[in-house]
Image (tube, rainbow, N blue to C red):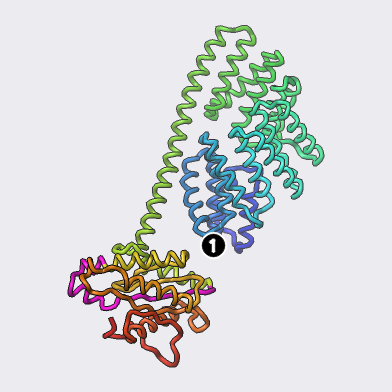
Amino acid sequence: METRTRDAEQLSAALTLLEDQYLFDAEATYDAAVEYEAEARILGNEHLITRAHLVQANMLMRLGDVAVAARAMWKIHQWATDHHDALVQARTHLVWGNIHRHLGDAAQSLEHSVLAVELMDETATPHMQVWHRAKLADALGASGSIDAARVQYAKSEDLAVEFDLPHLHMGILNNYAYTEWAAGENARAQAVAQRLQRIATEHGFVIDPSTLDTIGAIEIDNGRYAEAEETLREAVRRYHSGGYEDADSLAEYMLTLARAQRFLGATDRAQASLDSSRKLCIARNLGDVLVRVHQEQAELHAARGEFAEAFGVHKEFFEAHTALHSSQREAQARTRQAMFETSEARQEAELFREQARRDSLTGLRNRRYLDEQLPELVQAGGDLAVAIVDLDHFKLVNDQLSHDIGDQVLIQVAKLLETELAAVSPDGFVARMGGEEFLIAMPGFVAARAADHLDAIRHTIGSYDWASLTHGLPITVSIGVACLDTTTPTQAALLSTADHNLYVAKHAGRDQVVSGQARGGRTRSYRESATAA
C-alpha cells in the first residue's frame, strides 16, 4: 500500500477528523487509522502513533473485539500518562468507559467517564467538550443517577449550541431520550425525542434509522402505537435507501416494528416483521437480538390466543436467554482476563523498571536513575544544587573491621542521607554513585542555602552513635557542593565543580562542606587525587 506524505500538522488534523466523528463506519475508520499510523512512523512521531493506536482500539471495541481493544488500551494509557498528555488520557478514559459499559460494570464506566471530562484542558476540541460530557451523562444515567445525568445533558446541549454542532446536539438528544426511556420516564423521553425532531427539521437533517428506532420505542411505551409503526417503517425505509451497512441494526428495527404492530392488533404484520428480524438474526448470528425475537414471538402468540404455542416459544426464549448470558459471561471473562494479564504485565514491568534504578545494597537510587533524572533537572533550569558526598577514611572500616561492617555503615549512612534530605528538600533525591560515594540533588536551592542544610546533614552523620557498629572508629563525610548557574550550565560542568569542591574538602581536613565556584585555570578533582580518602 502506498503511503501518503503529510507533515505532522496535516496528519494531526486528519487524526482529529477520525477522533471527532459522531457517525462512522468502524471498519473504514480502523483502516484509515492503520494508514495514519504508518505515516506517523515515517515521521517518527510517537504522539501521532499513539493517537492512531487509540482510534484503532476504539474501532476494535465497536466491532466487538473488546478483549483485544482492552489489551491495546493499557499501552496507550501508559504512554499518555508517562508523557503527561492530558488530551490523549481524556480520550483514553472515554474508550475505557465504553469498554466497562460493555462489561456491564456501570461503576467503572462512570469513573472513567468522569476522568474523561476532568482531564480535558483548553486545547480540547469542541467535539470533545460536548461529547465527553454527553457520555458522562450516559454513564450517570446507566448508574441510576438520573438527576445528575440531566444536569450533564443540559451542559453538553448548551456547548453544542455554543459551538454550533447541531449533528452532535441530535446525538446528545438521542442518548438523552434513551436514558429517560430506560429509566421508565416515558413522558420525559417523549419530550426529549420531540425536541430532537424539531432540531432535525430546523436544520434540514434527515434523522438516521437508529434514532428513529429510539423514537419508535418511546412512542410504543407512551401508547402511541400507530405513530410508532410509521416511525419504524420510516427507519426501515431510510436504512434501505441511505446506504447503511450495519445489518445488525436492521434486525433491531424490525423487532421494534413488530412490537408496535402487535400492540396495534395487527398480528399478521407483526409476524411478518418478526420473521424478517429472525432471518437476519440467524444469518448474522445476532444472539442478543434473537433472544428478544423469541420473547416477542411468545408475546405475539399470546396476543392471538395461542397459549400453547406461546408457552413453547417461551421455553425457547428461556433456553436462548440462558445460553446468551453464558456466552456473554464467557466473553466478559475473556476481556477481564485480558485486562488483568495486561495490567499484571504492566505492574511487573514497572517493578522491574524501579528495581533497575535502585542500588541493591542501600535501596537508594542508583547511577542509572541519576543519569536519567539529573539531565532533566539541568535542562529545566531554575535553582539547583548538587552535592557529592564521600565517606572519610572508609577504607579503614573495611580493612580494620570487615566488608560486612562496611556494608552496614553504607546502609546506615544512606538512611540518614535520605531521611535528612526529605525533611528539607522533598523534591530532591539521593543516589549512590558507587563505593562510598553518594550524590544529592536539591531542586530549588542556591549554593549557600544548600550548603547550610548539607552541613547539618554532615553533622547528623558524624554525631550518630556508631559505637555498637564500628567500635569507636568514627564515621564522617566530606561534601562538595555546586549550583547550577551561568558558569555551570551543563550536567558535566555541575558535577565537575562539585567534585572539585569535594577534593578541596578532603585536603582541608575532611568532615566539612565546601561550595562555590572553582577559580582560575584547570582545577584538580577529588577523583584525580590518589591520596584523598
In this orientation, which residue lies closer to the viewer: 372 or 359? 359
Assign a secondary structure to mark 1: loop
The quadrant holding residue 440 is bottom left
- Quadrant (top left, top right, bottom left, bottom right) of the N terminus: bottom right
**397 to 93, vertically: above or below:** below
Residue identified by numbered label 1 = 45
Residue 491 spot, x, y in % from top left: 45, 77
**64 to 121, vertically: above or below:** above
**Residue situated furthest right in the rendering:** 202
Residue 494 spot, x, y in % from top left: 44, 79
Residue drawn where x is 67% and y is 33% of the image:
210
375 to the left or right of 12: left
In this orientation, which residue lies closer to the viewer: 224 or 26? 224
Residue drawn where x is 46% and y is 85% of the image:
517
Residue 194 at least partly seen? yes
485 to the left or right of 242: left
Q: Which residues are magenta?
A: 381-408
- Quadrant (top left, top right, bottom left, bottom right) of the C terminus: bottom left
In this orientation, which residue lies closer to the viewer: 450 or 328? 450
431 to the left or right of 332: left
**271 to 143, vertically: above or below:** above
**How many numbered callouts?**
1
Inspect the magenta stretch and tell me whether residue 382 lies in it: yes
Under mark 1, the amino acid is Asn
94 to the left or right of 343: right
